[in-house]
Image: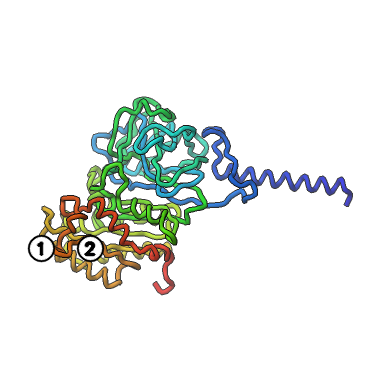
């Protein structure tokens, strides 16, 4: 082989390597000039692609928003959400689950908030989002869509701003009513307004947005929590991120030896295990049985599931007092998880003595369910939140410091105690045992 031929072959191989590297970069989600230009990798010697997608935030689609039957035509919706883990890129999920007509989104953006609960974007973080390479997307009634990824340094434990603009009426807005977080609206297309000055209308809801994923090397996967208002954090301090899932995310970030997982909260206030709520009820949602796959098992990077559900099956009409039927529903969702190779940590039903809906018959059914759960015949692992939260002096009631005041839902300190009670080693054991 002559030197000239050898040099030509080497040059050709180098060109191929450059083309492959460029293709990988674009495949990850280079923003094609829409989000501030390309970003160089931290380590030029590192492989072109390293890391994985994990979920950093989510909210379950709960209902069609009453009073928003035509959606939000001509309005920009800026959802404020809080990350559990960070990364070097991000993508979002939008849902039209409860819509009756196609939802047109002509403009969408993602940014890091300049301060907690603030509609202003941090300098240099505003990114325009695309869907299949296009700036606009139409989501069919009942459907959902995931954006293309954008390069953005997403911090852990920080607020993001996810903004959508719809130019035309779209039918009922799919929303999550008990966000415990203020979001914002503005008239007109203010999607990439970094100052936030136009966002003068506040809202306690999350609309259309159901998830944010991040690309990174630190997080190893995602924990999904599914349940009712106790998981939704309905009595936690608004804007403080004091749900039990937030405290769990803090443990997973900070504790030595903890698995580095993102945490997704798929709680719906009023949710039941066995019975679906009505389409327009803001305090029910689809049952856990009907939404387990969509809201938990199919989430990005899921490694394990924590389930807290069952009290509303006792509370709500039709009351279910048969513990065997409740436990059968729990076993059904565990079987679904096992079919995906995932283990499930399940909680006992927490005390509610002193609540206005309390009856001895309800409590008797609760205690029967708890006995079966503690036997180990329902979930792979058990977190005994009944024992965690109850008052030793009055075991049918919440401990006063853990009681929000309604004798059913925990306080911020109660939510912290719930997170502390989880055995993190159980969450590491994410795959199903061969004998299950």
Q: Is residue 31 above or below residue 343?
A: above
Q: Nearer the viewer, residue 331 or 110?
A: 110
**Mark 2 vs mark 1, CA separation in Å:** 16 Å
Please state if 410 lies on the left or on the right of 125 as rendered: left
Please state if 32 lies on the left or on the right of 165 as rendered: right
Q: Secondary structure at mark 1?
A: helix
Percent position of residue 425, x then y = 40, 65
Extreme residue in the bottom direction: 435
Residue at 13 percent of width and 63 percent of height: 394
The colour scheme applied to this rendered structure is rainbow
Q: Residues within 10 Å of mark 2 (few under 14, many from 20)?
A: many
Quadrant containing the C terminus is bottom left
Give the residue number, with chain letter if any, for mark 1. 360
Give the residue number, with chain letter if any, for mark 2. 386
Q: Nearer the viewer, residue 256 or 41?
A: 256
Percent position of residue 207, x then y = 33, 39
Q: Secondary structure at mark 2?
A: helix
Percent position of residue 180, x then y = 28, 43
Quadrant hosting residue 279: top left
**Mark closer to the chain start, 2 or 1:** 1
Q: Is residue 183 above or below residue 305?
A: above
Extreme residue in the right direction: 2
Q: Is residue 244 above or below residue 425?
A: above
Mark linked to residue 314: none
Quadrant hosting residue 377: bottom left
Residue at 30 percent of width and 71 percent of height: 376
Q: Is residue 161 above or below residue 7?
A: above
């Amino acid at each position: 082989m002559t030197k000239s031929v050898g040099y030509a072959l080497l040059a050709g191989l180098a060109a191929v390597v450059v083309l492959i590297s460029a293709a990988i970069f674009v495949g990850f989600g280079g923003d094609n000039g829409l989000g501030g230009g390309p970003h160089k990798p931290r380590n030029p010697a590192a492989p072109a692609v390293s890391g994985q997608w994990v979920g950093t935030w989510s909210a379950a689609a709960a209902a069609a928003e009453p009073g928003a039957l035509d959606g939000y035509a001509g309005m920009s919706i800026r959802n404020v959400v809080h990350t559990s883990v960070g990364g070097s890129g991000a993508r979002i999920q939008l849902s039209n689950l409860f819509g009756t007509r196609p939802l047109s989104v002509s403009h969408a953006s993602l940014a890091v908030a300049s301060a907690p609960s603030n509609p202003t974007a941090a300098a240099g973080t505003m990114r325009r989002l695309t869907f299949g390479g296009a700036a606009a997307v139409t989501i069919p009634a009942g459907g959902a869509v995931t954006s293309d990824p954008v390069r953005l340094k997403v911090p852990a434990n920080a607020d993001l701003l996810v903004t959508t603009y719809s130019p035309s009426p779209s039918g009922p807005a799919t929303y999550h009513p008990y966000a415990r977080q203020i979001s914002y609206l503005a008239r007109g297309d203010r999607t990439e307004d970094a100052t936030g000055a136009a966002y003068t209308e506040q809202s306690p809801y999350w609309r259309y947005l159901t998830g944010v994923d991040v690309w990174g090397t630190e997080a190893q996967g995602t924990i999904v929590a599914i349940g009712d208002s106790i998981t939704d954090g309905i009595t936690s301090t608004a804007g403080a991120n004091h749900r039990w899932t937030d405290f769990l995310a803090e443990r997973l970030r900070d504790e030595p030896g903890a698995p580095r997982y993102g945490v997704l909260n798929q709680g719906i206030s009023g949710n039941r295990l066995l019975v679906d709520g009505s389409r327009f009820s803001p305090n029910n949602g689809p049952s856990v049985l009907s939404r387990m796959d969509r809201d938990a098992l199919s989430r990005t990077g899921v490694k394990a599931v924590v389930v807290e559900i069952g009290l509303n099956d006792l509370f709500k009409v039709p009351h279910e007092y048969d513990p065997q039927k409740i436990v059968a529903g729990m076993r059904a969702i565990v079987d679904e998880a096992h079919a995906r190779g995932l283990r499930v940590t399940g909680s006992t039903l927490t005390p509610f003595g002193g609540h206005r809906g309390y009856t001895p018959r309800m409590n008797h059914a609760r205690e029967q369910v708890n006995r079966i759960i503690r036997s180990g015949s329902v979930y792979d692992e058990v977190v005994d939140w009944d024992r965690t939260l109850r008052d030793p002096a009055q075991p049918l009631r919440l401990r006063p410091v853990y009681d929000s005041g309604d004798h059913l839902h925990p306080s911020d300190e109660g939510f912290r105690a719930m997170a502390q009670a989880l055995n993190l080693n159980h969450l590491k054991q994410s795959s199903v045992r061969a004998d299950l």
